[in-house]
Amino acid sequence: MVGTSSWSSSSSCTSSLGSLDDDVVVACVVKAADAAVEGTCVKFLCSYGGRILPRHADGALRYVGGDNRVVSVDRSLPFHELQRKLREMCGWEAVCLRCQLPTEDLDALVSVTGDDDLANLLQEYDAASRDLLQPLKIRAFLFPRTTTTTPPPPSRTVPHALYHRQTGSAPSCASRWAAHQMSSPPARVLHQQQHHNRHGGEARPHRYLVQSASHW
């Protein structure tokens, strides 16, 4: 493996990847001190930015759109370093890595979240590549990891009296008067009396309006 930088890429078409049809696959290389030794590196065929959809002809699942890259890394690379390289390749802040096992279809992807998962994945592909001339590429699918936020609980309506009792603030004069107008019954004519007009000597009726409750 020859290269002067930690990442190198080249465009090439491949005919051995039937699930990709004729998509362009870019080869990316992670240089390591012992990666040139045969059998010390592993290759990931990574797809991202597309979708897994059924094919119209036979309904078989295939990956449509997006980018496809072959990434070669040292077998001893820790998972967090692999994840960092994948984030740099995709340009995402967080990457969810899901891989296809050699004996499974695209509808049974496994999530790789740590060193133990990565070691088990390598064992599966080592066993499947035992009788082959070249080891299989690990089929990997990358998805952006989104953080789900829990919506706040709905706010409850606090009763007006309870609100003022909790906050200690008294209602304004305008609100007190408006509340009185809404709660007080209309003024009624309680009685009608006749008073004598001492100047004219005539009896003139006068009506007195009496409020049912007084705030004065």
Image: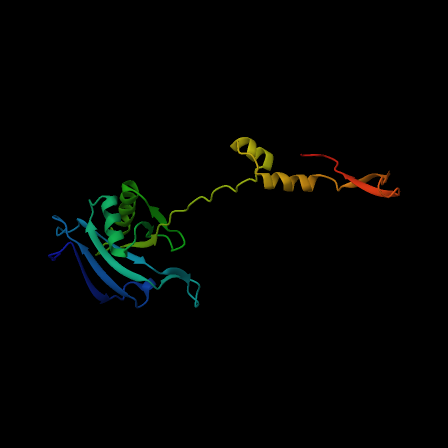
Is residue 130 toward the left or the right of residue 210 in the image?
Answer: left
> Please, is residue 98 above or below residue 191 in the view?
below
Residue at figure coordinates x 35%, y 47% from the top left: 111
Task: Please tell me whether residue 73 is drawn above or below residue 177 in the rendered image.
Answer: below
The x and y percentages for residue 108 are 39, 51
Q: Residue at x 32, y 54 (%)?
A: 142
Q: Residue furthest front?
A: 199
Q: Position of residue 5 (x, y in %)?
A: 13, 56
User: In the rendered view of the protein, which quadrant contains the N terminus?
Assistant: bottom left
In the depicted structure, whether residue 4 falls above or below residue 57 = above
Q: Position of residue 86 (x, y in %)?
A: 26, 52
Closer to the camera in the image, 140 or 209: 209
Q: Going by the image, does 172 lie left or right of 72?
A: right
Looking at this view, is 167 or 39 the one in front? Answer: 167
Tell me, yes or no, if residue 136 can be seen here. no
Instruction: Reply above or below: 72 against 187.
Output: below
Quarter location, residue 80: top left
Residue depicted at 55% across the width and 39% down the height: 156
Check the picture and name the quadrant holding the C terminus.
top right
Where residue 131 appears, as percent x and y from the top left, is: 24, 53
